[in-house]
Amino acid sequence: MRIPNISDAEWEIMKLIWKSHPIASEEIINTLADKTSWSSRTIKTFINRLLKKGAIGFEKSGRSYVYYPLVSEKECVRAENSSFLERVYDGALGMLFSNFLEEENLSEKEIEKLQELLEKKKKQFSLRPKEK
């Protein structure tokens, strides 16, 4: 399944839908109107774009519409990460991590978590059958 390209504004709507679905259009509009400076018309435009992209589906419930995701948050995050990595670092994951680690101030706990993840990956790699 192809993951649709979702804009930054559309991500805000998707986060709401992933968090609590099915969700009524009024709830999306009220939540985002409070959080952003978007008008209800703008929010409806973003919802319609997501529908056209196949990111969300809807059902009519009485006089309103309720929306639900057609793509998972995990799939979208993975696609976005991959797209970012290609755009900014030409796919060089090591360069991304090097720049991140050099620029960011990490707590001891965050460093320990990263070490754990790297060790886990290292073990997975060493368990793979060796290629001839």
Image (cartoon, helix red, strand yellow):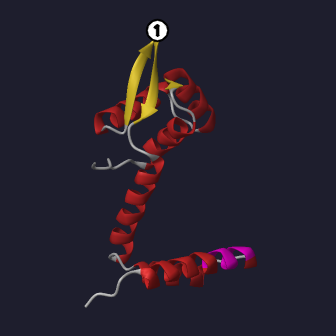
Q: Is residue 105 visible?
A: no
Answer whether residue 113 is magenta in the image: yes
Answer whether residue 80 is magenta in the image: no
- The location of residue 52, given as percent across then percent down, is 29, 34
Vertical side of 36 occupied by 92: above or below: below
Q: Residue furthest top?
A: 62
Question: Going by the image, does 32 lie left or right of 9?
Answer: right
Give the residue at mark 1.
63
* Chief SS of the magenta region: helix
- The location of residue 38, given as percent across then percent down, is 52, 34
Q: Which residue is rendered at x = 51% and y = 27% of the image?
A: 22
Which corner quadrant of the image does residue 46 belong to?
A: top left
In the image, what residue type sits under mark 1? Arg
Which corner quadrant of the image does residue 79 belong to?
A: bottom left
Q: How many marks?
A: 1
**Viewer-closest of 93 and 115:** 115
**Viewer-closest of 46 and 124:** 124
As helix, strand or loop, the secondary structure at mark 1 comes to loop
Magenta span covers which residues? 109-114
Q: Which residue is rendered at x = 30% and y = 39% of the image?
A: 53
Q: Which residue is rendered at x = 43% and y = 42% of the image?
A: 10
Q: Residue furthest right?
A: 108
- The location of residue 72, given as percent across then percent down, is 43, 45
Vertical side of 65 occupied by 56: above or below: below
Classed neighbour count for the residue bearing mark 1: other residues with Cα under 10 Å, few (<14), some (14–19), many (≥20): few
- The location of residue 41, given as percent across then percent down, is 44, 26
Rendered-image quadrant of the C terminus = bottom left
**Viewer-closest of 25 and 36:** 25
Q: Residue furthest left?
A: 132
Question: Going by the image, does 15 lie left or right of 112?
Answer: left
Q: Is residue 11 visible?
A: yes
